[in-house]
Structures are given as structure tokens and as C-alpha cells.
Image (cartoon, rainbow, N blue to C red):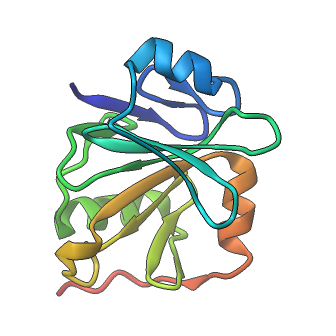
Amino acid sequence: MTIEIIPYSAFGPLRFEKTTKHECVRILGEPLKKRTTRRGIEEFEYEQFIVRFNPETLTIRECTLLPYADATINGITITWDRNFLRLACEYDQSPSDVYGFIVLPRFGIAVTGIHDDDESQLAITAFTKAELHNWLTKSVPYVWKQG
């Protein structure tokens, strides 16, 4: 399955701030794992991604693609390499670094593991506009470096 990410709006068939936990299970089936983080965020893990829910509204707040999941964003195929990150940074024009996550506001995503060749950290997280604010309060500008 190829997951289409629509910035701040959708992650495949799931809608940010609209799809509930019950609807998520109805749409995708039972997750492989369910857990609650120390911060009280409930997570559903599926084969290619993790879905996280807002504890107040019980709707989707963010989704994290697991390494090498098939996905597109704004018609661009996510290739899990520096070429994808370069294209994304060029398109975004204002990427930020938040503790090793490259945040791309025009895409509504944070990327890790690609820019520093740390395959153990590979992940791409798509989030809501409210979550973007949380990311950017801790950010510094990121400058693409061919590496």
C-alpha cells in the first residue's frame, strides 16, 4: 500500500484531527501493537507506520512512517535518501532542525535519520498544524549540506 500524505490534512485514508481511534481500527484493522507513552499519548503500530492520538480529543494528531514505507507527499515519492531530503528542502525553503529532526513546514513533516546517515533513526512524521507550532518553538534553521 502506498500512503499518500496531504500536509496537515491526511495520512492515507486517515484525517488529522478528525479520525478517531475507533474509526482508525475500522479503516485499517487492528494494529500490531497498542501502547501509551509516558506523556499519555496512545499509539497504534501498523506494519508501515505508527498512528498517535490526541489525549483530549482521541483523534489523530500525528503519524510516523517506518523505514522504507511506500509513501508520497505532494506527489513526490519518499525515497528514504538524501535526494528526497534535498528536494524537500528546496521545495520547503524554510527547513528547521529540532534536536536532529529536520522539520519541513510546507510538507507538515519531520524527517530523521536521512540527513545524518543514521539508518537506526529513519522515520518521517506527519503532523497537524498545532503540532507544527510545538516543533518550531525549539527549532534552528537547517541548511542542506550535500554529504
Q: Height in image: 33 above or below 22? A: below
Residue 123 lies left or right of residue 11; in this view the side is left
Percent x, y of residue 62? 56, 46
1 or 107, which lies in front? 1
Count of number-bearing discs? 0
Residue 62 lies left or right of residue 143; in this view the side is right
51 or 30, which lies in front? 30
Q: Which quadrant would the C terminus be assigned to in this image?
A: bottom left
Q: Height in image: 32 above or below 139? A: above
In the rendered image, which quarter is residue 140 located in? bottom right
Q: Residue at x 19, y 70 (%)?
A: 82
Percent x, y of residue 10? 53, 30
Q: Residue at x 45, y 14 (%)?
A: 27
Q: Residue at x 63, y 67 (%)?
A: 38
Percent x, y of residue 33? 38, 42
In the rendered image, which quarter is residue 57 located in? top right
* Residue farthest along the right direction in this orientation: 56
Q: Residue at x 55, y 69 (%)?
A: 94
Residue 26 lies left or right of residue 54; in this view the side is left
Q: Which quadrant would the N terminus be assigned to in this image?
A: top left
Percent x, y of residue 121? 29, 73
